[in-house]
Image (cartoon, rainbow, N blue to C red):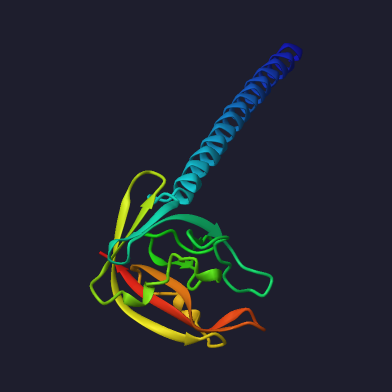
């Protein structure tokens, strides 16, 4: 009788030992697989995020408009303290609004330039008003890729008018809008009365 009890105890210990080892093994592999899976998931997600952030269009570096002899370097600007789009530093360059899409991406890319520089120095967009429907605009990016845009229309805005449509589009297409001042110079406000906007669509 005593030997049977001892045998049962030994058997119970063996079974418990097996169960314990099985549990430890199971936990180990689950933890390993879980950690590996999590690492892979983060890694793959990171790749996805990087790819999502990488545009197929590089940063714009040159703007070319053969009809009005423009071949200008592109600067990058954001907003002024007054929440207006900033402008290039000098008369020769243009400036891309880098808070919006790159030229060629879906949405509306915006580039501005000066008109009527002081002391009658030529400015990059002095002849912007000469562009007509069908004229071509070329933007070269840092990768050496040139994207072509076709002028759709030109429009004048009062300097105080709501021109939010110049920066926004929801049609899923790619647009490029060029902005410059126009009209009479106001020496007190140090600005011109109007804004000229040329609307263009990707070819």
List x then y, in percent, for residue 41: 52, 40
Residue at the far front in the pictured view: 119
Left/right placement of residue 29 relative to residue 177 reads right
Q: How many marks?
A: 0
Query: Which of the pair 150/65 is nearer the observer?
Result: 65
Image: 73 above or below 28: below
Q: Residue at x 52, y 60 (%)?
A: 98
In the rendered image, the quadrant that contains the C terminus is bottom left
Left/right placement of residue 55 relative to residue 161 reads left
Residue at the far left in the pictured view: 134
Image: 35 above or below 175: above
Residue 80 position by quadrant = bottom right
Residue at the far right in the pictured view: 2
List x then y, in percent, for residue 8: 69, 19
Residue at the far top in the pictured view: 3
Residue 13 position by quadrant = top right
Image: 63 above or below 3: below
Q: Residue at x 44, y 46 (%)?
A: 51
Left/right placement of residue 94 relative to residue 84 reads left
List x then y, in percent, for residue 103: 39, 60
Q: Residue at x 39, y 83 (%)?
A: 155
Left/right placement of residue 45 relative to residue 8 reads left
In the rendered image, the quadrant that contains the N terminus is top right
Residue 135 position by quadrant = bottom left
């Amino acid at each position: 009788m005593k030997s049977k009890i001892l045998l049962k105890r030994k058997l119970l210990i063996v079974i418990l030992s097996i169960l314990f080892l099985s549990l430890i093994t199971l936990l180990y592999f689950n933890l390993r697989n879980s950690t590996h899976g999590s690492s892979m998931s983060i890694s793959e997600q990171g790749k996805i995020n990087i790819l999502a952030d990488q545009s197929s269009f590089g940063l714009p570096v040159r703007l070319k408009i053969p009809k009005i002899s423009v071949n200008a370097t592109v600067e990058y600007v954001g907003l002024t303290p007054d929440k207006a789009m900033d402008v290039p530093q000098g008369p020769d360059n243009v400036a891309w609004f880098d808070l919006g899409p790159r030229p060629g991406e879906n949405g509306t890319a915006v580039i501005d330039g000066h008109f009527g520089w002081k002391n009658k120095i030529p400015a990059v967009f002095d002849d912007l008003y000469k562009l007509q429907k069908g004229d071509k605009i070329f933007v070269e990016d840092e990768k050496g890729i040139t994207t072509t845009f076709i002028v759709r229309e030109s429009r004048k805005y009062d300097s105080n008018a709501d021109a939010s449509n110049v920066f926004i589009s929801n049609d899923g297409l790619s647009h490029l809008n060029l902005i410059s001042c126009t009209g009479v110079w106001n020496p007190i406000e140090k600005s011109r009365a109007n804004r000229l906007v040329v609307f263009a669509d990707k070819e």
